[in-house]
Every structure is written in C-alpha cells, then in structure tokens.
Image (tube, helix red, strand yellow):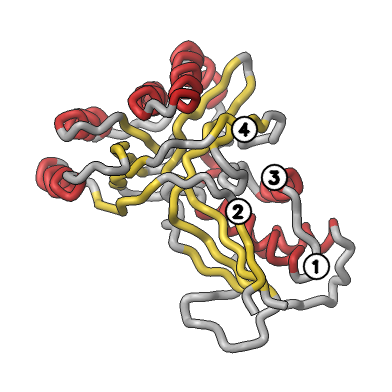
Amino acid sequence: MTYYVRAPGTCGEFIQGAINGQSFLVTCPINRYSYALSQVTHPLPHYYCSLQPKSSQARNLVKDILHIPSRDNTAIYIRSDILQGKGMASSSADIAVAAMATALSCNRALTPKELETICLSVEPTDAAFYPGITQFDYINGSICNFLGTCPPLKILIFDEGGTIDTISFNQQKDLSHKIQEKEPIIRESLELFKKGLETHDITLIGQAATLSAFANQRILYKPNLYEFHDIGNAFHSVGTIIAHSGTIMGLLFPSDYTAIDECKRYIEKKLPTLQYIDIVETTNEGLTYIKYL
C-alpha cells in the first residue's frame, strides 16, 4: 500500500525567544509543503527524489524504534515546495514526512509526540507537524503547548539573501545571553499573541509578531526590516513576521486583502536588494496522510 504524506513548512515564527530560561518558538505553518510517498512500486514524476541525509537519518531512527530489519529497503521518495536554508522549516518538514512514511510502510502511524522526538534527534526543529499553532521548545522539546487555531492570514514573503545553517546558528556562544536580554519583550509578545488567537484578532497577532521580529535584531540583524515594516504599514499590513534564524521576512495581511500585488511591486521598487519569494496563507492542518493507491 502506498501512502501519501505531507507536512507544512513555515514563514519563520510568530515568536521566538525564552521565558525563565525556557527557549521556545510559536509556529507559523503555511500552505507550502514537503511530501513523501512510501512503498512506491510504479514510476514517479521527476520532481520526487530519494532521501537526503537528514531524512535518511529520520528513516533509520524510525526503523530502530519499530524494530524494522535493517535489510528492509522499502522505497521512500520526497518532494518539497519549501525553500531550503531560509527559515521556512524545510528540513523539519522533510524529516517529519520521511519518518511518517517509513512508519506507514510498516502499517504504523507515528503520534505527534513520536514525530517530535525523531525530529529533535536529527536537529533543532519546528513543530509545524502539530495541528494548529504550537508553543514549542525547538531544542529539547520540553514544552509543547497547543495555543489554538490561527485566523486566516495572507503573508507576502521576501528574502534578504544567503542561507542560515540551523545547527550552527543555535551553537553561538553568546546566543543564550542575547535571548535572555529580550525576555521582557517576548513576554509581552506572547500575551498579545494568545489574546489574538483567543479573540481571532489578527491585529493583536500582527503586533505580537512585530515585537518579536524587532527584538531579534540583536541576534540576527536584518538591514531592511524597519523600512520593510514601514511599507507594510502604508499598505495596511497588520504586522511583520520573520525567520528568527533565517533570512526571510513577511508582511501579514487579512485573508481578503486585495492590494497585496501592489504592495509587492512597491517593495521591489523601494528595496531592490530584497528578493520576492511567495504569497502564502496560514494553515492549521499539521501533518496529514492518505492511502494513495
């Protein structure tokens, strides 16, 4: 039986920081995905490929957990809509779908907690495979709080260029001190965000994301962030979101906003060093799978 598995990427994080020494992020899952097919016995479209090292590591971890014989070579193939190295959780999504597809090939579905353990065993991870919006310890998994579902939002995404390696970024010697310095802002941001989810007030959600984005400037400076945000204000964005350990920035808009293409063109004119990436929407579905054939 072939299974079709998909997991969303992210547009960075709504919030990332620490409170009382506990590191966490707040997920921002979007409708761009990594996909996996398991137990494939027929020709595949060219855009599917065999497992990359991190996904292969996840597959081996699942085989150990489920006591699958090492000689089992059931094929798993992956494709992805998510840009790599930009802070869009491409690796997390690849790892999650590879792990789930491996388990399904043995007639077993992994729980979100099992997926979390496997992903964290490979690298610091996002938790977009959980449904809804999650406050998650991306290093150790010591907290995983479901915060609610996100109201529909459109996000206009631009990139400042380059790539960031997640593992190297989280190994910076002074990172913990810099994270501690911004704790008061992160506390305020998290309270605003929770209230925004509770009341489905996208203005509060946007304010929370903006606070966290600005507070991250001492950790990973984005030269165009403030002007990017000002342009968003002029076009009635509700806030700015970033990849706290990546290179992308996004403007948050109501789902029925109609002038987003005009805003895109204005940014391309005023900030020519930025590269347009995509216009996406938030999602709450988490990792999903179906029997394919």
Give the Cα separation between the discs numbered 3 and 1.
19 Å
Q: Amino acid at mark 2?
A: Leu
Q: Earlier in the sequence, mark 4 or mark 2?
A: 4
Classed neighbour count for the residue bearing mark 3: other residues with Cα under 10 Å, few (<14), some (14–19), many (≥20):
many
Give the Cα separation between the discs numbered 3 and 2.
12 Å
Classed neighbour count for the residue bearing mark 4: other residues with Cα under 10 Å, few (<14), some (14–19), many (≥20):
some
- Which mark is drawn over residue 233? none
- Which mark is drawn over residue 146? 4
Give the Cα separation between the discs numbered 1 and 2.
17 Å
| Nearer to the camera, 76 or 1 | 1
x and y, in percent, of residue 255 in the image: 32, 43
Give the Cα separation between the discs numbered 3 and 4.
14 Å
Mark 3 vs 1: CB contact within 8 A? no
| Nearer to the camera, 273 or 49 | 49
Q: Residue beneath label 1, please? A: 107
Q: Amino acid at mark 1?
A: Asn
Q: Residue beneath label 3, please? A: 116
Q: Residue beneath label 2, please? A: 287
Element assignment for label 1 = loop
Q: Amino acid at mark 3?
A: Glu
Q: Residue at x 80, y 67 (%)?
A: 107
Asked where in the image residue 72 lies, by quadrant, the reply is: bottom right
Vertical order, 172 against 199 (above or below): below
Classed neighbour count for the residue bearing mark 2: other residues with Cα under 10 Å, few (<14), some (14–19), many (≥20):
many
- Asked if one can make out residue 218 in the rendered structure from this viewpoint, the answer is no
Give the Cα separation between the discs numbered 4 and 2.
15 Å
- Asked if one can make out residue 231 in the rendered structure from this viewpoint, the answer is yes
Vertical order, 24 against 251 (above or below): above
Element assignment for label 3 = helix
